[in-house]
Image (spheres, rainbow, N blue to C red):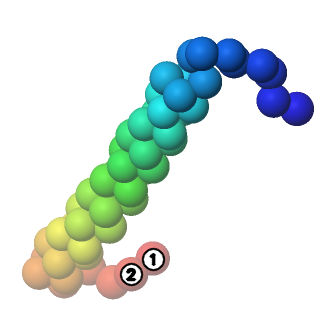
Amino acid sequence: MMPELGKYAGVVLSSYAVTMLLLLAVVGLSLWRAARVKRALHEVEMRQGKQDG
């Protein structure tokens, strides 16, 4: 169900698109950073001689 946006349709829909792109970018960067930190932590633990788990 799409509301009638009239002359503002372009602005509203482009705002939604930009918002979705920004949210996806934040999620993507968060996942990338989490993986990077996890790898770094694993490396530090291996240097200290600790086992997984």
- Percent x, y of residue 38: 30, 67
Q: How many numbered discs sit on the rendered protein?
A: 2
Q: Residue at 81% across / 29% down in the picture?
A: 2
- Percent x, y of residue 49: 19, 83
Identify whether 2 is placed above or below 40.
above
Disc 1 to disc 2: CB gap under 8 Å = yes
Tell me the element at label 1: loop
Q: Amino acid at mark 2?
A: Asp
Q: Residue at 31% across / 53% down in the picture?
A: 29
Identify whether 25 is placed above or below 43.
above
Q: Which mark is residue 52?
A: 2
Q: Residue at 45% across / 76% down in the picture?
A: 53
Q: Amino acid at mark 1?
A: Gly
Depth check: 9 or 51 in front? 9
Q: Residues within 10 Å of mark 1 (few under 14, many from 20)?
A: few
Which quarter of the image is occupied by the N terminus? top right
Seen from this angle, which residue lies furthest left? 47
Residue 34 visible:
no
Depth check: 41 or 16 in front? 16
- As measured in the structure, the alpha-carbon distance from the residue carrying label 1 to the one carrying label 2 is 4 Å
Q: Is residue 19 left or right of residue 30?
A: right
Tell me the element at label 2: loop
Residue under numbered circle 1 = 53
- Percent x, y of residue 30: 35, 51
Residue 4 visible:
yes
